[in-house]
Image (cartoon, helix red, strand yellow):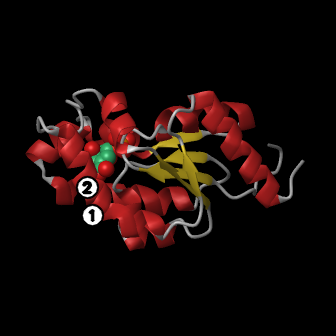
Amino acid sequence: MNNKHQRSLVLTGFMGTGKTSVGRKIAQRLEVPFFDIDALIETREAQSVRAIFETQGQAYFRAREAEWCTWLARAETAVIATGGGALVDPRNRSAFGCCYIVCLDAAPLEIAARLGNARERPLLSDPSALERIERLLSERRAAYAALARHVDTTGKSIAQVAEEIIALYRAESGRP
Ligand code: S3P
């Protein structure tokens, strides 16, 4: 990418849909910086997301997440991966209103397989992961549906999803 003022690409979607891996790949291909909001929070707080949930609570985590959304929305062209709950909050969706947002989707069974026992994900740490995934997905359905662009990642590799998104991004930006 050679236009510094191209709008940033924001990847969101449920846990296990590949936001971080796909985002890193796209950023490499487009030669722009990559930011992962969970990683930024962990570095700034010097604690894992799980530990933040346990010691400070979810509301504290959500407040830090919202700060990063506001801050990154003003950054020059970058690829940004949010945590799965970030854009459930309409204020964070509107913070990124000027960006190119893509929501990654995946079938619940595939999400469960990708996450394994998901020890580091505080919202999925009970034993009935598939049930919990289906419940959280249905609670979030309306919020994710409010996002205009979706890419289904079920059965696709990270590279395939990355190429699909780059093609969409270029086509909609009128770039070759
Ligand atoms: C969350 C998703 C996680 C992390 C936190 C909460 C969520 O990020 O932000 O555990 O609410 O969906 P990933 O989607 O990157 O796992």
User: In the image, what residue type sits under mark 1?
Assistant: Glu
Residue at x 18%, y 55% (from the top left corner):
58
Q: CA distance from mark 1 to mark 2?
A: 5 Å
Q: Is residue 8 above or below residue 166?
A: below
Residue at x 82%, y 51% (from the top left corner):
3
Callout 2: SS:
helix
Quick one: 111 or 143, which is closer to the camera? Answer: 111
- Does the image show residue 79? yes
Residue 87 is labelled as none
User: In the image, what residue type sits under mark 2?
Assistant: Leu
> Percent x, y for residue 162?
64, 37
Total marks shown come to 2
Callout 1: SS:
helix
> Percent x, y for residue 31?
72, 35
Q: Residue 118 sits in which quadrant?
A: top left
Left or right position of 47 against 86: left
Q: Is mark 2 within 8 Å of ligand 1?
A: yes
Residue under pointer 2: 136
Residue 139 is labelled as 1
Contact between marks 1 and 2 (CB within 8 A): the answer is: yes
- Using a 10 Å C-alpha cutoff, classify the residue at mark 1 as few (fewer than 14 neighbours), some (14 to 19) or many (20 or more): few
